[in-house]
Amino acid sequence: MEPGDSTKQARAAAQLRKGVLEYCVLALMRDRPRYGVELLHALEDSGTLATSQGTVYPLLSRLRRDDLVTTTWQESTSGPPRRYYALTDSGRAALDEFTRVWPGFRNAVDDFLAAPHHSTGDPA
């Protein structure tokens, strides 16, 4: 690995993560409400999508403002009450739309990365 390669890889991973994190968080709430730290642990367990509280909590706030999630407070047996996030109908619709779009997007990117492509147009 050449000097700077790890920085370039980290930058590329950060950009990809930024683009899909919202939908991954929504997907984690598909079957049941989740609280913030639980979401962080699930993202961390994936390895690739690990992120910080400083990223997830502002994202959750935006999802709430955009009416994609609702929140409720629930007592915890191991500490203070927790704020749980659950999908709204709009959140479920957004996740469903992403789920429909993602395979074509992923396949297009995979196609570009898998084989060299030759330009059919005139060089600029």
Image: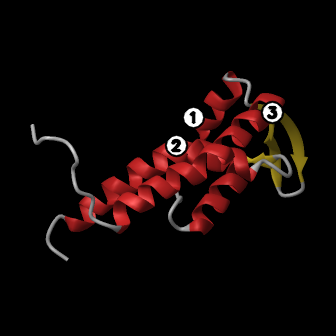
Q: Amino acid at mark 3?
A: Thr
Report whether 8 appears left or right of 92: left
| Numbered mark located on residue 71 in the image | 3
Q: Of marks 3 and 2, which one's residue comes earlier in the chain? A: 2
Report whether 116 appears left or right of 80: left
On the image, which quarter does residue 62 sit in? top right
Give the image location of residue 90, x and y in percent.
77, 28
* 10 Å crowding of disc 1: few (<14), some (14-19), many (20+): few
Q: SS at mark 1? A: helix
Q: Amino acid at mark 1?
A: Pro
Q: Closest to the observer: 98 or 27? A: 98
Q: Closest to the observer: 72 or 79? A: 72
Label 1 – label 2 distance at C-alpha? 6 Å
Residue at image location 59% in from the left, 49% down from the top:
102
Give the image location of residue 82, x and y in percent.
80, 44
Residue at image location 47% in from the left, 45% down from the top:
18
| Numbered mark located on residue 55 in the image | 2
Image quadrant holding the N terminus, namely bottom left
Image quadrant holding the C terminus, namely top left
Whether residue 112 appears in this view of the structure is yes
Report whether 69 appears left or right of 123: right
| Numbered mark located on residue 89 in the image | none
Give the image location of residue 73, x and y in percent.
85, 37
Q: Which residue is mark 1?
A: 58
Residue at image location 21% in from the left, 50% down from the top:
119
Label 3 – label 1 distance at C-alpha? 14 Å
Is label 1 in contact with label 2 (beta carbons under 8 Å)?
yes
Q: Residue furthest left?
A: 124
